[in-house]
Amino acid sequence: MSIWESIKSVTNRFLAKPIVKITSKEMEAAMKMMDRLKTLGWCEQAAATATAMAMSESSFNTGVEGDRSLANKAYGLFQWRGIRFLDLQGYAMKTGRSWTDFNAQIDYFNMERAARSHFEMKWHTLTDLTEGCYAGYRYEVYAGPIQPKREAYAEEFLLEWQRRHH
């Protein structure tokens, strides 16, 4: 059994599929993000998993400040912190955009992802939602049992994107 089959098996056996609520504003932002990722070479399934990650991290608020109780706060769609946040700001400035620009953050995320480990480098090609969400975990290394919720968001975003584009 592959690692992905094992993850699915555990998820299916022990964790009920969560019901996620997505506002119309969040869904529009999700579709905009998926469209942007598609122009950057992402397959629709992988784009859905990255979009689910952004939903979980920021609800698509590019200026959000997270982890306020920590000295090293996190910012933006993917909650960048420390040197990674400074790098996002520098990238945005070099490209003539604000660090809070939606597309600047997506473009930076894609560039940062491409420079990571072999697994994360191929994230944009992963057609299995569980595998794609695991790539998101490797990118971020988040804590807690939030994988099923991210997969549920990814499923909803993928279905809506396919409804609009196919």
Image (cartoon, rainbow, N blue to C red):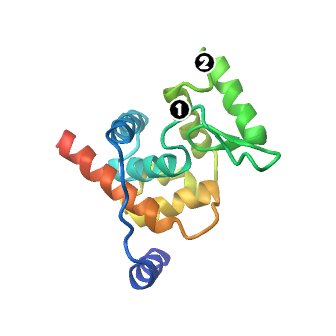
Q: Position of residue 106 (x, y in %)?
A: 51, 35
Q: Earlier in the sequence, mark 1 or mark 2?
A: 2
37 left or right of 91?
left
| Residue at the image point whose x is 66% and y is 18% from the top | 94
Circle 1/circle 2 CB separation < 8 Å: yes
The amino acid marked with disc number 2 is Thr
Q: Badge 2: few (under 14), some or many (20 or more) residues near its Cα, within 10 Å?
A: few
Q: Position of residue 109 (x, y in %)?
A: 57, 39
- Secondary structure under badge 1? helix
Q: Quadrant of residue 73?
A: top right
Q: Out of 146 and 161, give the one closest to the viewer.
A: 146
Q: Badge 1: few (under 14), some or many (20 or more) residues near its Cα, within 10 Å?
A: some
For disc 2, the marked residue is 95
| Residue at the image point whose x is 45% and y is 59% from the top | 150
For disc 1, the marked residue is 107
The amino acid marked with disc number 1 is Asp
| Residue at the image point whose x is 37% and y is 63% from the top | 128
Q: Position of residue 55 (x, y in %)?
A: 47, 47
